[in-house]
Image (cartoon, grey):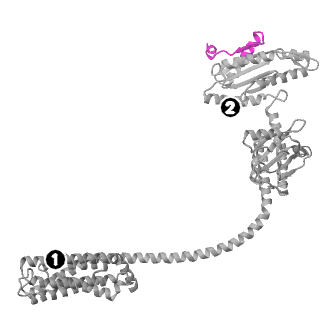
Amino acid sequence: MDTLENNQLRKTLGSYFRHEGTITRFGWVIMAILVVEDFVARLVTTQTVTGFALLAVQLVLYAGFVLTGVLKLSQIGVRNQDQSSLYKIAKYLEIGIMTIFISLMYHGSVFYFIVLLPLISIILSRGFKESLRYILLGWLTQTLSQYAVIFLFSGLNQQGFYTNRFMLFISIAVQYLLFAFCGYILGSVHREYVRSQEENQILIDRLGDKYVQLEQAKKEIQSQYDKISQTNEQLEQANTKLTSSLAEFYTLQQISQAISSIFDMNELLKFVNDVIIGVMGVFHSTIALCHGPQNNLKVQVSSIFDKKELAIVSDYINSDVLKPSVKDGNSMIDNDVNPDDYPFTRGRKIQSLICVPLIAKGNVLGIVLIEHGIPNAFNSDNVRLLEIISQQVGIAIENARLYQQMHDLATLDGLTGAYNRLYFQDNLQIEFKKAQEGNYDLSLLMFDIDHFKKFNDTHGHLFGDLVLKNISAYIMKKLRKEDIFARYGGEEFVILMPHTTLDQIVEKAEDIRRGIGSMMISDRVISASVTISIGVSSYPETADNQVTLIKSADDALYEAKRQGRNRVCVACPKSSKKA
């Protein structure tokens, strides 16, 4: 406990000792000024030689004060200087000399506060208990020096000296008792500071203990980490062997999920292409499908975003170097690509590639082409994995085509390729709601072929079917992507056109009527032409809802037939109907 208190004391005195030199030198200056002041005061007041004698004594005391200060300063920086005997002796001498010096001054009673100033600094920096010996020293030296001055210079009229020796003793004692009482009060500041320092030290010690515990825990964790690292290395070696199998499993799982959930061909192939890029870690991946009787390849999806580079791939994808994959269903790998041999790689700095056919039910459906910018990027394991993926993709393509066929059977008219009536009615509700919410025009065109029953009776149903096909093909070329063309029944057709006003659909109807009327439909035996009658209506100008939109268009078609056919009639405005 004593060691802790000593440590706290040294910390408390740290700043005091740092400024000890400055304080000491400042004391030398003050003492020099007091010597001059006292000499001048005595010379002016008494004008006797005694003042010069006192000056000599004061100069000797000043010299002793300076030497004492030098001795004290020599101990600054010495380890445990607060416990150094020389330092304590110098401090005692410093206070004693200063007290004697002030006692010899003509106005000494005025300057005794100077002695108290270093005592105050000791109280604040070291505490009241530590300062008691210095206070006692000050009281003792002041008392003795005062009596010495009275005894030695009793014949002189010394201003400020007491003539009653007993009262002088009592006065000095009272002064120091009062100062000791004030010092005790000031010492509470030091006590509070030391207490806070002790509490801080306790916290620091606790933190130190925690730090030691943390260091021990850190060492234990490091030891565990080293063990885990060794185990991890062993696991990584085993994991490396399983990586390819896991990649295959993950890839096949993703593709299997896609096959069961994605039925749109383009979306499915795009998803598979992204999976291939992620699993194989390649620069580019392209899927091309076979089209036509010659099985010509056509790029379906590709990771190549540059339009010029993609155009080169599309133009040269049917090069002879890939024919073994397309015709024979063989995979190929090249880890030293020559752009002259692979014209579709020109300008893209491709160094390695693999081409694997997409096969389903023994038929080549297309190819998967992956490319890398570094040589020797692929091996036989990559080819094997891509072949497994390609098998799944081939199955997916076959399923997507079957789904598309089923979708077409459900939504398209088998003869003309136009949407069927059920699809039209479902989408009419959707489009009409959109038109109402979006506050835009929705127009309907309804037509049928003039005298079609008689035409069938004359030329036969097969030729009649050919007429329906040709008319449907012609109209599909004339429509926008958002328009809905449907076979409404028999030879009657409808066209739903969003964002189209009544005037616009009338103009469109006239264009279609003239185009079909000028068509010559023929087979190997028969050539003939037909005309159509058209009725048009539009929301909101001639119809309020989907029912009145169909009915008003049908009424206009009936009016066109009544007026002689081969013409366009417009539904009556809503105001005319109300009238």
Q: Is residue 575 magenta?
A: yes
> Between tags 1 and 2, which lies in front?
1
Q: How many marks?
A: 2
Mark 1: few/some/many CA within 10 Å (<14, 14-19, 20+): few
Report which residue position mark 1 lands on.
36
Q: Amino acid at mark 1?
A: Val
Farthest residue in the top direction?
A: 563
Does residue 420 show up?
A: yes
Percent x, y for residue 452? 84, 17
Range shown magenta = 556-579
- Amino acid type at circle 2 is Ile
Q: What separation in Å lies between label 1 and label 2 (alpha carbons)?
A: 114 Å
Q: Earlier in the sequence, mark 1 or mark 2?
A: 1
- Residue at point 83%, 41% (across, down): 317
Residue under the point 39% across and 81% down: 7
Q: Where does the C terminus fall, quadrant-wise?
A: top right
